[in-house]
Amino acid sequence: MSASTPSSRPAVTEREAREVAEAAREQHWRKPSFAKELFLGRFRLDLIHPHPLPGDEAAQRGEEFLAKLRDFVETKVDPAVIERDARIPDEVIDGLKELGAFGMKIDTKYGGLGLTQVYYNKALTLAGSASPAIGVLLSAHQSIGVPQPLKLFGTQEQRERFLPRCARTDISAFLLTEPDVGSDPARLATTAVPEGDDYVLDGVKLWTTNGVVADLLVVMARVPRSEGHKGGITAFVVETNSPGVTVENRNAFMGLRGIENGVTRFHQVRVPAANRVGEEGQGLKIALTTLNTGRLSLPASCVAAGKWCLKIAREWSAVREQWGKPVAHHEAVGSKISFIAATTFALEAVTDLASQMADEDRNDIRIEGALAKLYASEMAWTMADELVQIRGGRGFETAESLRARGERGVPAEQLLRDLRINRIFEGSTEIMHLLIAREAVDAHLSVAGDLIDPEKSLGDKAKAGANAGAFYAKWLPKLVAGPGQLPMSYGDFKHGVDLSGHLRYVERTSRKLARSTFYAMSRWQGRMESKQGFLGRIVDIGAELFAMSAACVRAELLRGQGDHGREAYQLADVFCRQARIRVEELFNRLWTNTDDLDRKVAKGVLSGTYEWLEQGIVDPSGDGPWIADATPGASQRENLHRPIR
């Protein structure tokens, strides 16, 4: 196959797509995982309590940078201008570069600041509170852009060549998605054909956050198998100014108006083999491993949203009067304020705990990071929606309009728009449910997977049956009783407010969750993977239990430090009580739901059975294909690449 031969999109079966995803995930658990144990019915509080903390030097370095960053965003950033112009001013980006914000996660020996994950996320929370677009710019650059993959998989030569640039001058982006490829990378069409000492890239990438202004790109492309080449999806560092790279469009969205997100075409782009990250075929593994910690940037932005929601709700509800008293004193509004306060406390607890666990590197946090992203994105959206409701008509009105008529310009509706993408970014809620569920049932599949695989031989099934019998003979009895049934368990979490009961609830409920999962696997066996509604609820229960655990552990940490411990215990208590109600509802819906009926109706909708229901409207959509053509070839459009120097 020559470099000029256009590639066709791979045709893959459902099984082949699963096999690609399975091959990319980490196959072994070399370190303990609190969340994995939780799904197995084992509440390992010892893995998160006492709450881990950064070292003194790391904390000092982090606090010093946060002080500089706060001064910068307060004096140099005008969020209203970014929203109005749909662009972060170049001088703001230049200022962030001078501050070192683009090198927060890069080691000091490469010119970076060398911040821990904890302080990196605190910085993203601070920057994102000033402008979510700035938070996205910084996180896309170093959470999933060039620095993180090179830190994990790059050669020493690659790190020395690219990391100093990323720390101070160059902006990076991560390019995986294509017009017809989202969370199903088995269908990836962009190719990288070996030719001498180079690879030649051809293809189109969609939704390239930072791509419009990036200097360096991490690109995922398919290398064809050939003599001397293993082939497979592979990662490359690509210079954006290389001949054949064209930014064809700057995309616009309902929120995050200041982000530089585009469509990038590669036509006969020569990339040195020295720019390949890892081995051929390791691309998806690199992407997934990068996201294990990279996803934590989204919870950081959600924490910022929660804190701001709380501030505005407090200030507004104290001055807005209805029926003779401030609206905060009406129970209907007060319950919303309580939810925002308690949930913000929990989201910060989850984010800080997962971040510190990433820094310590004692635990495998692939599930914790995914749960943090899933839970924070869903809860932050709900908090923003509640803030809009508390603000009433003013919540629906734009900040610009409010200012124009003489009131405080509170961008509540903008927050709602900006946060909506977090439920889609870096794995939609639906995909996160499936990803986490796969990891949560890994222990079961490891011992009994061959039993439910229709393609396995009778011999394989017999062996799996023996292994499963031995595993479950030891595991199932342990799900019957535990510390959660002993009244004095977790007594060190009782200080005025009693949190020990919530931890006992988590312990009992984790065993109930494990029993429910086992029962479902026994009932549905190979059809389990199609029960996405059930799996989603299982994961959501686990997310609530993780958040309850984190909230209690954080409250005890703050109490021990003498830092608002009494108030922290109150917030943790309220959050856990609210979470327990949600958990019980989710358990009820495991077995009492409309999943089967929903599938039938969905099939009917697709077959046209209910098409009559669509009559009586006009469709304002424009003409054109549902998915843009992404046939490889030379670009016919103007290059919109806009490097910032």
Image: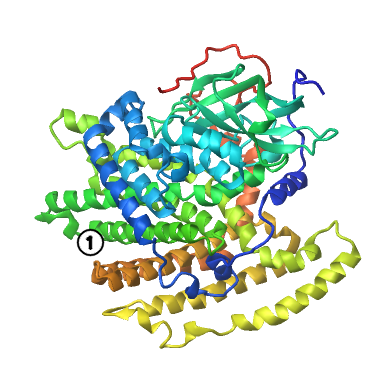
Tell whether 338 sits left or right of 27. Answer: left
Q: Which residue is mark 1?
A: 331
Q: Residue at x 49, y 17 (%)?
A: 640
- Which residue lies at the image location 27% right of the left edge and 43% below the top edge? 68
Q: Amino acid at mark 1?
A: Glu
Residue 184, picture quadrant: top right
Colour basis: rainbow
Q: Nearer the viewer, residue 179 or 79?
A: 79
x and y, in percent, of residue 201 in the image: 68, 25
User: Split into 4 quadrants, where in the image is the C terminus?
Assistant: top left
Which quadrant of the structure image shows residue 240? top right
**Measuring 41% from the left and 88% from the top, which residue is drawn there?**
488
Could you say where residue 89 lies in the image, as x and y percent from the top left? 33, 25
Q: Is residue 23 above or below residue 557?
A: above
Relative to residue 115, is residue 242 drawn left or right? right
The correct choice, above or below, for 31 with respect to 96 in the image is: below
Image coordinates of residue 139 in percent, x first then y, are: 44, 41
Q: Is residue 380 above or below residue 210?
A: below
Q: Image point 48% across, 85% down: which residue?
A: 485
Quadrant for the N terminus in the image: top right
**Secondary element at image label 1:** helix
Residue 210 in the image: state x and y as whole percent.
47, 30
Q: How many marks?
A: 1
User: Which residue of the protein is positioned furthest toward the left in this rendering?
Assistant: 324
Q: Is residue 623 at least partly visible in the picture?
A: no
Asked whether the viewer can see residue 29, the reply is yes
**Callout 1 crowding tier (Cα within 10 Å): few <14, some 14–19, many ≥20:** few
Q: Is residue 14 left or right of residue 348?
A: right
Left or right: 124, with 410 as reference point: right
Of 635 and 456, nearer the camera is: 635
